Amino acid sequence: MDPHDNPDALPRSVFQPATLGPVLLRNRLIRAGTGESMADPDGRIGQDYAALHDNLARGGVGLAFTGHIYSHRRGRYGELQAGLDTDDAIPGFRRVTDAVHRHGGRIFAQIAHAGSQSMSFATRPLAPSPVDNVMTGRKVCAASDDEIHEAIDAFRSAARRAVEAGFDGVHLHGANGYLISQFRSPLTNRRDDHWGGSQENRDRFPTEVIRAIRSELPPDRGLTMKVGIADLVDEPGGLSVDEAVQGVARFVAAGLHGVEISSNLMSDYVSASIRGYVAVGPKEAARDLLLHRLHRTAEPEAYFLPFADAVRTEVDTSIILVGGIRRVATMETLIRDGRADFLSMARPFIREPDLARRLSTGGQTSPACVSCNICLMHDEHHPLQCWRIPRTNLLRHAAYRFSGGFKGKGSGRKPTAHEDE
Ligand SMILES: Cc1cc2nc3c(=O)[nH]c(=O)nc-3n(C[C@H](O)[C@H](O)[C@H](O)COP(=O)(O)O)c2cc1C
Ligand code: SF4
């Protein structure tokens, strides 16, 4: 028997096959959800989106999560975001999954709803309660019971379309301040009906969404969730780690195969989720013309590990660790010691789509990405790419930035700390 038929019999290593629920992956490396910003005004994707995922699969990654895909027009985050809100999205995604499968890769659709964090001013966002969005300041009304059921149905239909498009599974976006995070946090969910009040009630919306998606997935497809473990905002009284972990147990009971660990509500992306200069020493900074790093401190690797440990102690499910996963030596330790089952990376795969192969052959021991976050500044402004290579991209970035290109376009987010080159 080929030992790859029974991956549990293999030693635990980053570069050995492993199963995530019913889905066999060729290794434990995952491309984390990273918004591609490649869709047209109707949310339809083209050849560049398929080419990006073709490259990742060709480059040896075990599994790719797509960037967040809106399930309902009102849940659209930005104007360049892809959607799975209608059946005419299916053929475009079919081309993506076919390309990935040709290279032996696997791909899950990350289905999302931005809630009040939508930066698309063409939509009227949905929210559990009339609380201004902490990041965007956007004003919202409380959703009616019918609107909540409509959102659940939209997730269900998006999952059905994902199956028809040939995805190997669904990765539900339940973190980083979007609609599910808003339902889970006492700061943004002030309802006193059965969608709010107690933590169990605040977890009802995601639980119903998971059940609805599960009902559409054949047994051979995976279901995972990016889940927010604690609100990382200045205001006190937010979702605590203990409450969040109890929620994870509920979600796993409702049908998840694994969870990717992240933050819940955030006051900004960089301090709470996409930290700068991870494990970048002065030498790497100088080599990559990263002058800003020379007067900043590097962030540590694997910065969501304490959250992952909290989940691991209480809940029996596959743990996908994201957030500053960098050196192969660290990866192997995390997997060998059982602190994570899979490791996902976002920025490193933007710069090096073939990173999985480079690391597995031993020629390279860490990614070239220096977590400068320029790619994040361009999210929803330009198609996803690394802005440090080729070097002329840095000039294009500077010209766009200093011509005021980020104001009032796309996400319209203001640069924050570490997004300041
Ligand atoms: C440009 C950009 C776009 C992102 N888009 C998404 C997204 O669509 N969905 C998501 O769950 N996370 C998104 N993230 C967050 C990443 O998945 C990841 O959690 C974060 O970047 C930390 O991982 P890293 O240190 O490997 O980059 C994005 C990050 C970046 C830099
Ligand atoms: S612009 Fe390039 S180097 Fe900077 S964080 Fe993005 S991928 Fe990494």
Image (cartoon, grey):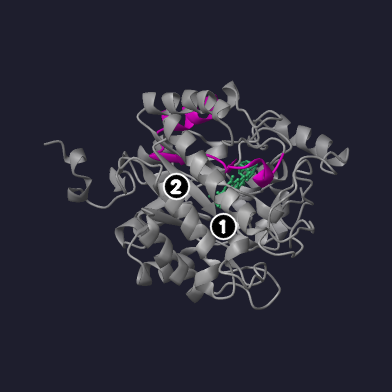
- Mark 2 or mark 1, which is nearer the start of the sequence? 1
Q: Which residues are magenta?
A: 50-78
Amino acid type of the residue tagged 1 in the rendering: Ala
Q: x, y percentage for residue 59?
A: 43, 31
Quarter assignment of residue 29: top left
In front: 335, or 379?
379
Q: Which residue is mark 1?
A: 175
Which image quarter is the N terminus in?
A: top left
Residue lying farthest to the front in this orientation: 146
Q: x, y percentage for residue 301?
A: 51, 59
Q: x, y percentage for residue 13?
A: 29, 50
Q: Secondary structure at mark 1?
A: loop
Q: Which mark is residue 213?
A: 2
**Ligand 2 in which quarter:** top right
Q: Is residue 231 magenta?
A: no
Q: Measuring 48% from the left and 67% from the top, which residue is drawn there?
A: 307
